Image (cartoon, coloured by chain):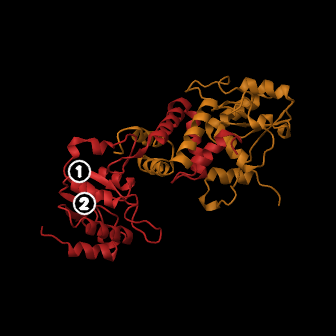
Chain colours: A orange, B red
Amino acid sequence: MADGTGIETLIDLMARLPGLGPRSARRAVLAMLKKRAQLMAPLAQALAEVALSAKDCRVCGNISTTDLCPICTDPARATGEICVVEDVADLWAMERGQAFRGRYHLLGGTLSALDGIGPEDLGIPRLVSRVAEESTREVILALNATVDGQTTAHYIADALAGTQAQITTLAQGVPVGGELDYLDDGTIGAALRARRRL
Amino acid sequence: MADGTGIETLIDLMARLPGLGPRSARRAVLAMLKKRAQLMAPLAQALAEVALSAKDCRVCGNISTTDLCPICTDPARATGEICVVEDVADLWAMERGQAFRGRYHLLGGTLSALDGIGPEDLGIPRLVSRVAEESTREVILALNATVDGQTTAHYIADALAGTQAQITTLAQGVPVGGELDYLDDGTIGAALRARRRL
């Protein structure tokens, strides 16, 4: 449908974004066509700029438009704490939590013998030397509570065993606002074992 | 969050698209960041091209990247039938139906005394002269079944009364796959009045 030219290509590309299908992509393109100057042109420019300038931060692996990401260059965040996360989505999630004020290390995945992903691919040797160089006091492993995530966490803990840094991991338990009735047995078990005095 | 630079701007712009909020915009941008060459760069280019070249078709008002839209230049569609629709979304909906093989006329809105939208703003005089020039046999009014849509339809029917064209409108009735129990009273009444022999 549409017009057999650029507009159809645009709808096809938009439909490949997560959360958008052919129908909602069409709706989004229509909205943009109605606001060509206010929305479509700025969006095209922002996309082109980011596509051109986005790169991995040299130190932590965060995606940014500069060589060093804003977190690595922020002097207030040199707290001697490094939080290890799987990817940018997890870093953004941690930042939304507004609880961590140190710096990050992005793995870009988890160890996987099947997919041939080893410690070098995740920058684990780089993390070990970084911990030594920066005299890091604490490394917080904020990996997903999946089998792959936990395997990787154990490997990193072993790799960092020779350094001065203390290795910690996120607490497991009942999520804020969570109802026991809807929680899986594993989470309830973990929350009970990690119970604390009131 | 994100990185205080172009990426945040991009998320803000994406969040202004219909069907996307801050959360899904973030997810879409992350997906694009992971596929910079395959998705982000082509999308930026497609957007820039359409933003630059999209214009209203001189004849029918359809949005296209050419002076005359592909429907108006398709010789197979010179059937002497003109379908009057409110906007591009409705034209696309008609095209998806694959039942109409003539050409279109886009109003770009409905008559509204409150908003100061008169017949000239909707190109109704242009439609009348077009019907005369093209010796149109039939004008199909495919306007929304709302009060505004129907007022506009009546006005157009009056304006075209002096021409040779027959004026028709879309049938009202039970939608395909519709259940009577869930239909409003108005639709059931209209379907009953327009009942036909089996």
Instruction: Give the SS element for disc 2.
Output: strand
**Circle 2/circle 1 CB separation < 8 Å:** yes
Residue at mark 2: chain? B
What crowding class fits label 1: few (fewer than 14 Cα within 10 Å), some (14-19), or many (20 or more)? many
The x and y percentages for residue A45 are: 58, 38
Q: Is residue B172 visible?
A: no
In which quadrant of the rendered image does the N terminus of chain A lie?
Answer: top left
Report whether A139 appears left or right of A8: right
Are labels 2 and 1 assigned to the same chain?
Answer: yes
Instruction: Give the SS element for disc 1.
Output: loop
- Could you say which is closer to the camera, residue B41 or residue A93? B41
In the image, residue A100 sits, relative to residue A178, either above or below, namely above
Identify the residue shown where x is 51% and y is 47%: A36
- Could you say which is closer to the camera, residue A91 or residue B13? B13
Identify the residue shown where x is 45% and y is 43%: A15
The x and y percentages for residue A89 are: 64, 41
Residue type at the position of mark 1: Gly
Residue type at the position of mark 2: Ile
Pick whichever of labels 2 and 1 is earlier in the sequence.
Answer: 1
Identify the residue shown where x is 29% and y is 64%: B175
Residue at numbered disc 1: B102
Report whether B40 appears left or right of B110: right
The x and y percentages for residue A126 are: 74, 24
Alpha carbon distance from label 2 to label 1:
10 Å
Report whether B162 appears left or right of A51: left
Identify the residue shown where x is 22% and y is 67%: B161
Q: Which mark is residue B21?
A: none
Residue at mark 1: chain? B
In the image, residue A2 sits, relative to residue A106, either above or below, namely below
Quarter residue A121 falls in:
top right
Residue at numbered disc 2: B140
